[in-house]
Image (tube, rainbow, N blue to C red):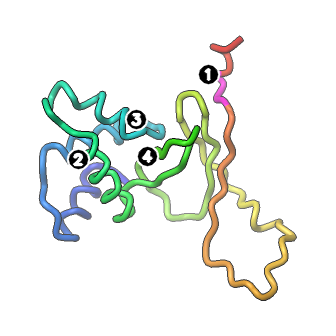
Amino acid sequence: MNVEKAMEKLKDEGFKYTDKRMDMLQLFSDESRYLAAKDVLEALKDKYHGLSFDTIYRNLSLFSDLGILETTELAGEKKFRFSCSTDHHHHHLICLECGKTKHIHQCPMDSSSMPTEGFKVVGHKFEIYGYCDACEARTL
């Protein structure tokens, strides 16, 4: 996903173009990591005085509902990032310190011996949490 495609998706779904939405999406485009609503507020507070946490969270939820952003939970906090631009099935390694992600191209479900008899699997999510090399080096 990129900003142009995201704005087009909003328009196609009947939502208005606003500078705030554009700037929020640009922030996600500029960052290759998961961001919390508080990160978005911090980044935009000087440009939009009086910008509320509720406004940010409503827009993040909208973006997520439309498939523009994907979500995860890190340290008990919901975090967001642009949805991957690839359509092929994959999962992520996620750094707990900086939130950067890396694709895992092998799906653990492919080799799983999990019993699914009497149950139809329609989706799954697999994430591995740890520390990227840069963050690990800083803690040494």
> Is the C-beta separation of discs 3 and 1 under 8 Å?
no
Name which residue type carries label 2.
Thr
Task: Tell me the crowding category of disc 2: few under 14, some 14 to 19, or many 20 or more residues within 10 angstroms, Cα based.
Answer: few
Question: In the rendered image, which residue does mark 4 sit on?
Answer: 81
- Of the two numbered discs 1 and 2 on the same chain, state the one appearing first in sequence: 2
The CA span between labels 3 and 1 is 16 Å
Q: Which residue, as the protein is rendered here, is positioned at the far top?
A: 140
Q: Nearer the viewer, residue 121 or 41?
A: 41
The CA span between labels 2 and 4 is 17 Å
Q: Looking at the rendered structure, which numbered label has been put on residue 55? A: 2
At horizontal 66% and vertical 56% (from top left) the residue drawn is 126
Can you give x and y, in whole percent of width and height, for residue 57 in the image? 32, 48
Question: In the rendered image, which residue does mark 1 sit on?
Answer: 135
Left or right: where 70 falls relative to 89: left
- Of the two numbered discs 1 and 4 on the same chain, state the one appearing first in sequence: 4
Q: Quadrant of residue 13?
A: bottom left
Residue at disc 4, secondary structure: strand
Can you give x and y, in whole percent of width and height, for residue 1 in the image? 37, 54
Residue at disc 3, secondary structure: loop
- Of the two numbered discs 3 and 4 on the same chain, state the one appearing first in sequence: 3
